[in-house]
Amino acid sequence: MNYENFKIACKAKGLTITEYLESKGLTSANTGKYKKGGNPSVPLLIEMAVDLEVTTDFLLGLTDKKSAPSGAPDDIGINELKELFTTLSEQSQDLFLEYLRVHIKHEASLK
């Protein structure tokens, strides 16, 4: 994980990294791990991205853009979604489904 990007994302939410990690039930050992370039599990990474309203690519340091590019479709039809899903590898399908589960859980907690 890109520690500086993680720090930027937390700060934008008015949190320190320690405060954010504690809210997730994690310890300061995780701070050291991430500072050294370690990565969280994929489900946790997705949850962090959702919580901090940034992309996983931003947290991993793959881009300096915090959000998805403008022009990304907001309303993909179910048939198009099915078609796109079937083009993914089995591993990518699993990751995508895990992302959806985490995102839906997060959305439900906001209500």
Image (cartoon, grey):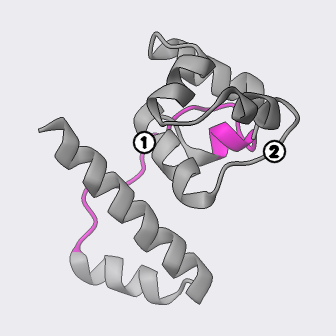
Spot the residue most to the left. Answer: 111
User: For mark 2, does the 10 Å Cα neighbourhood hold few (<14), some (14 to 19), or many (20 or more) residues?
Assistant: some
User: 93 or 87: which is nearer to us?
Assistant: 93
User: 21 or 93: which is nearer to us?
Assistant: 21
Q: Residue at x 65, y 38 (%)?
A: 59
- In the rendered image, the quadrant that contains the N terminus is top right
**For the residue marked with disc 2, what is the amino acid?**
Gly
Q: Nearer the viewer, mark 1 or mark 2?
A: 2
The answer, for residue 28, to whether it is visible in the render is: yes
Q: Does residue 75 show up magenta in the picture?
A: yes
- Asked if disc 1 and disc 2 are in contact, CB closer than 8 Å, the reply is no
The answer, for residue 74, to whether it is visible in the render is: no
- In the rendered image, the quadrant that contains the C terminus is top left
Q: Is residue 81 left or right of residue 26?
A: left
Q: Residue at x 61, y 82 (%)?
A: 91
Q: Residue 38 location in percent, x, y?
A: 81, 44
Mark 2, residue position = 38
User: 64 or 26: which is nearer to us?
Assistant: 26
Tell me the distance, in whole angstroms, between the alpha carbons under discs 1 and 2.
19 Å
Q: Residue 88 location in percent, x, y?
A: 55, 83
Spot the residue most to the right. Answer: 36
Q: Residue 12 location in percent, x, y?
A: 50, 14
Which region is colored magenta?
57-77
Q: Earlier in the sequence, mark 1 or mark 2?
A: 2
Q: Secondary structure at mark 2?
A: loop
Magenta region, main secondary structure: loop
Q: Residue 49 location in percent, x, y?
A: 50, 41
Relative to 91, is 66 above or below? above
Q: Is residue 62 left or right of residue 12?
A: right
Q: Does residue 61 show up magenta in the picture?
A: yes
Mark 1, residue position = 50
User: 79 or 108: which is nearer to us?
Assistant: 108
